[in-house]
């Protein structure tokens, strides 16, 4: 490896960092509910399949559903997690 170049991380490392950042953002948003000035960061939007799709095949029932819960603090958490991850490398 040449000097000054970093080793590339696999895609799954980035996926884990983004997921942890999103969770961190949700936690930050929930913590800011008590502060009226920052309460706008905790407003969330639910995006997904609601109610879940159900296929009843008489011998097998398949249910498919997912929901993303997003608020304005999620991008803050993702950026914060990526920044911490970059510092640790």
Image (tube, grey):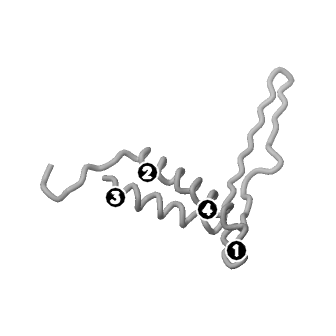
Between marks 4 and 3, how big is the CA–CA gap?
21 Å
Q: Residue at x 68, y 54 (%)?
A: 68
Q: Which residue is mark 3?
A: 87
Q: Is residue 86 found left or right of 7 in the rendered image?
A: right
Vertical comparison of 73 with 58: above or below: below
Q: Which residue is mark 4?
A: 28
| 61 or 71, nearer to the observer | 71
Give coordinates of residue 3: x percent, y percent. 13, 56
Q: Which residue is mark 1?
A: 40
Sequence-wise first label, 3 or 1: 1
| 39 or 22, nearer to the observer | 39
Q: Which residue is mark 2?
A: 14
Between marks 3 and 1, how big is the CA–CA gap?
29 Å
Q: Residue at x 35, y 58 (%)?
A: 86
**Mark whose residue sits in front, 2 or 3:** 3
Q: Quadrant of residue 46?
A: bottom right
Sequence-wise first label, 1 or 4: 4
Between marks 1 and 4, how big is the CA–CA gap?
12 Å
């Amino acid at each position: 490896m040449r000097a000054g170049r970093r080793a590339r991380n696999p895609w799954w490392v980035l996926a884990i960092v983004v997921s942890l950042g999103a969770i961190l953002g949700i936690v930050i948003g929930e913590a800011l509910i008590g502060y009226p000035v920052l309460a706008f960061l905790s407003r969330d939007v639910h995006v997904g399949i609601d109610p879940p799709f159900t296929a009843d095949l008489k011998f097998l029932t398949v249910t498919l559903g997912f929901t993303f819960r997003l608020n304005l603090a999620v991008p803050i958490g993702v950026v914060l997690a990526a920044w911490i991850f970059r510092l640790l490398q």
